[in-house]
Image (cartoon, rainbow, N blue to C red):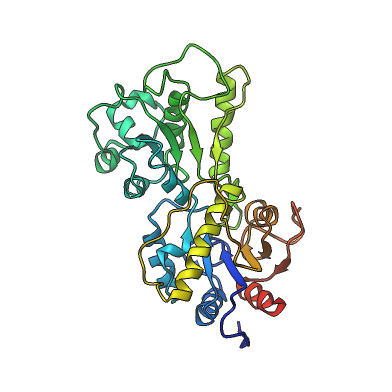
Amino acid sequence: MLFKRVITRGFHKDIAFAFDIDGVLLRSKNPIPGSSEALKLLTKEKIPYILVTNGGGVLENKRTEFISSVLDVDISPLQIVQSHTPFKALTNKHKKVLCCGLDSVREVAKAYGFQHVVHPMDILAANRDISPFSSVTDSYLKKVAQTHESLTETPFDAIMIFSDPKDWATDIQVISDLLNSDGGRLGTLRKYKSETPSIPIYFSNDDLLWANRYHLNRFGQGAFRIIINSLYSALNDGKALKETVIGKPTALTYNYASHVLIDWKQKLENGTTDSTEQILPPLGVPPSTKPFDKIYMVGDNPASDIIGAHNYGWESCLVRTGVYADGDKLPCKPTMIVDNVWEAVTKALERQ
C-alpha cells in the first residue's frame, strides 16, 4: 500500500484524534497497514492524539510499550485510556475489591492504588467447591492464586470487571454470590430481593463483539455482562440489576478521555511529553474547557466507537478493518466511512 505525502500546517491547535486499537491500529498483535504511517504523521505535526480502547487487562505502560514497538512510533502511557483506566478514580471510594479478568488485572488494580485486591482464582483456590464446574487445574491455581488472611470475615466493597475473564464459570458464580450476599460477605445470602446489589458492580466495557484473527467476531465483555444481569434478575424476582458500565460508548469514558486529551495537548505545547505525571480526571465530570475545534474518533465498532463519539459531540471515522462490514446496520451516521486509519487521518486533515 502506498501512502501519499500530506501537506499540513506546522501545528494544528484546533484538531485532535482518538483511536481505537483492535481493528483500527492492530489486528490481534499485527499492525494494520497504514496505522504506523498515520501516527507518525500526527507525531511529526505535533497534533494531539490518544488511544481509547475497550481492551485492557494490563498496565497502560505495558500496552503502549508493545504498541510503540509494533508500530515503530513513541506512544506515552499518558496517551492511552483502556477500558479500566477510569477505575483509577475509584481508589479512594473502595478498599477491598473483587477484580475480575485476566491474571494480570491483579497487578493493574494494585498499581492503581486499591488496598485489598482479590481475584476470583484466589477464592477458587481457597475452596474448589465454590465453582464445581470450573476446568481450572490445581497446578494453574498454585501458580496464579494468592492467599488472604480472611476472605469471608471482612466484607467486599465492590466488584470490578477489568477485562474478559478466562474462567467464566468461576467468575459468574463468585460475582453472583457477592451481589446477593449479606453486606458483601462471601459465603452469605441476604434475605431480600432488590434491584440494588449488596455491593456495587462496575463493568469496564459493554462490547458484545470484538475482532481478532478469527474470521468471525468473538464475544466480549458485553456478553459476560448479559449473563450476569440475567442471572441476577432470575434470582431477584425479575428485578433488573443496578450497575455501573463504563468504556465506550458511555459518556463517563468520553469525559475521562477528553481530560486525558487536553492534558496531552498541554504537554505537547509545553514540551513535557516525557513526563510521567498526569492530572487524574474525576469520574463523570466533563472538562471545564474545550480547546479543540474538532476531535475525530477513529474506530471500527459502530456500537461503541461511532455512537459514543456521535453522542458526545465528536466527529467519527468508521474504518473497514475491524468489526464493521459494508451493509451492517448503523446506530448513527458517521462523519466518514473509510478503508483504513491512514485514510481517516488524511481526510480529516484535509477537512480542516
On screen, residue 139 above or below 15: above
Q: Position of residue 68 (x, y in %)?
A: 42, 71
Residue 282 position, x and y percent, is 48, 48
| Image quadrant where one finds the C terminus | bottom right
Q: Is residue 167 above or below residue 239?
A: below
Left of 244 or right of it: where is 186? Answer: left
Identify the residue shown where x is 74% and y is 55%.
Answer: 328
Using the rendered image of the protein, determine whether residue 27 is visible from the camera's viewpoint. no
Residue 211 shows in this picture: yes
Q: How many marks?
A: 0
Q: Position of residue 108 (x, y in %)?
A: 36, 49
Left or right of 234 on screen, residue 199: left
Q: Which quarter of the picture shows residue 351? A: bottom right
**Residue found 59% across the figure and 35% down from its top:** 226
Residue furthest to the front in view is: 288
The quarter of the displayed image where residue 18 is located: bottom right
Relative to 14, is 288 above or below? Answer: above
Residue farthest top in this picture = 191
Front residue of 18 and 276:
276
* Image: 298 above or below 54: below
Q: Is residue 240 left or right of residue 134?
A: right
Residue 34 at what x, y percent from top left? 57, 76
Q: Nearer the viewer, residue 23 or 246?
A: 246
Residue 302, picture quadrant: bottom right
Residue sitting nearer the eye, 308 or 277 = 277
Q: Residue at x 66, y 51 (%)?
A: 303
- Decide if residue 239 is on the left or right side of residue 199: right
Residue at 60% over, 82% down: 1
